[in-house]
């Protein structure tokens, strides 16, 4: 851990000192020798520090057996410890690099022309084109049903998968292999955002609400299945043992011993997921997923900010309404 930190700090120092540009950084990232030398230097420094029994950030995060807990040691101000300075320098360097990578510019933020342009846009937002309201309402209804269909179709699939992805259900060696494979599949699929799935399905089935609904469905299946499985893993063993004592099989044990314990959390999280899908449906519309997002993207591309203001107001109202309703229902289910 410490070797990687030292190599990272050394790499940043080289980039800053020699003012390496973007092409130079690409060359460095492709050169394994550079990384090898930096890691070797970090390893040597790490060994030297441990030889002098100097506590490091790596020891704090990953203490060795018998090393003791850092929190149990005598309280010392951070600036009098190597760990404190190591962490402070690491955070400071990371902040500086982050500002450089993201091209932070106070002068551009305070630029008069840019500020006046933003004021014009906000002024248009405050004077929306209400003639667009019927069309915006129709599109937001389409968005709500996209989210509803994606959630409704995801629930039965996620319900089945969640038990296969629960460790306390898949205990046999062959079952654990299914559990591990399914968990890996779910983690990989969840890492692909709904926006990417919308692009895929826009090519597959064509641009429109069906593509957006399918994108939300895929993401909802794995998200619901993962959360459902965590609820299943947290059930009490008492009712399960009671059902098993009657000679019930695995399916009867799940249905009568587990499902009654998780049905309310399932419903609560499903409502929350529908609420989340409504927000996500707006975003997938930007890449051809239909709904209010497509209309918003179209007017934004044309620079028609009054129309954009109308759509933003409609979206904000619907999101607030759905958030309030879902929160009320979830509270009632507790």
Image (spheres, rainbow, N blue to C red):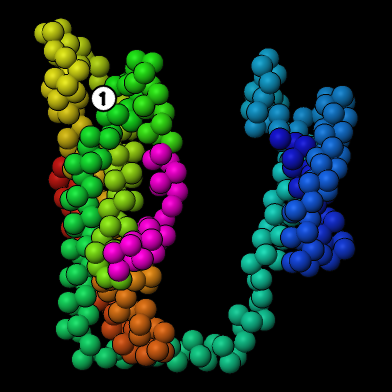
Query: x%, y% of residue 208?
Result: 27, 70
Examine the rendered structure and indicate whether residue 291 appears above or below residue 269.
below
Magenta stretch?
185-206
Examine the rendered structure and indicate whether residue 332 appears above or below residue 324.
above
Q: Which residue is at a point 34% across and 66% down the rendered structure image?
A: 202
Q: Is residue 233 visible?
A: yes
Q: Which residue is at a point 42% across and 60% down the rendered structure image?
A: 196
The residue to which callout 1 is attached is: 235
Q: Helix, strand, or loop for circle 1? A: loop
Q: Which residue is at a point 67% across and 81% down the rendered structure image?
A: 107
Examine the rendered structure and indicate whether residue 323 appears above or below residue 299.
above
Q: Nearer the viewer, residue 286 or 242?
A: 286
Q: Which residue is at a point 25% across and 76% down the rendered structure image?
A: 314
User: As drawn, is 115 to the left or to the right of 158?
Assistant: right
Q: Is residue 324 visible?
A: no
User: Residue 53 falls in which quadrant of the image?
Assistant: top right
């Amino acid at each position: 851990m410490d070797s990687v930190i030292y190599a990272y700090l050394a790499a940043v120092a080289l980039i800053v000192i020699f003012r390496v540009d973007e092409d130079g950084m690409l060359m460095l990232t492709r050169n394994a020798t550079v990384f090898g030398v930096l890691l070797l230097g970090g390893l040597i420094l790490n060994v030297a520090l441990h030889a002098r029994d100097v506590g490091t950030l790596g020891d704090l995060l990953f203490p060795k057996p018998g090393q003791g807990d850092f929190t149990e040691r005598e309280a010392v101000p951070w600036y009098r410890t190597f760990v404190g300075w190591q962490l402070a320098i690491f955070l400071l360097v990371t902040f500086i690099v982050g500002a450089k990578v993201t091209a932070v510019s106070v002068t551009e933020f305070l630029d008069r022309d840019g500020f006046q342009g933003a004021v014009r846009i906000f002024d248009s937002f405050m004077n929306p084109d209400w003639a667009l309201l019927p069309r915006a309402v129709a599109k937001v209804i389409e968005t709500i049903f996209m989210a509803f269909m994606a959630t409704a179709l995801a629930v039965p699939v996620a319900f089945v998968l969640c038990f296969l992805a629960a460790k306390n259900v898949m205990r046999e060696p062959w079952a654990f292999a299914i559990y591990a494979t399914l968990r890996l599949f779910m983690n990989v699929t969840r890492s692909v955002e709904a926006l990417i799935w919308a692009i895929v399905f826009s090519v597959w089935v064509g641009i429109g609400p069906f593509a957006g609904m399918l994108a939300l469905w895929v993401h909802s299946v794995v998200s619901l299945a993962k959360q459902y499985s965590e609820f299943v893993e947290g059930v009490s063993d008492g009712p399960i043992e009671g059902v098993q004592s009657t000679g019930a099989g695995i399916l009867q044990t799940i249905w009568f011993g587990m499902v009654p314990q998780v049905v309310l959390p399932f419903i609560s999280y499903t409502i929350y997921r529908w609420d989340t899908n409504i927000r996500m449906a707006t975003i997938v519309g930007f890449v051809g997923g239909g709904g209010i997002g497509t209309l918003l993207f179209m007017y934004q591309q044309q620079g028609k900010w009054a129309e954009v203001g109308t759509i933003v107001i409609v979206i904000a109202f619907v999101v607030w309404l759905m958030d309030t309703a879902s929160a009320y229902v979830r509270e009632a289910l507790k």
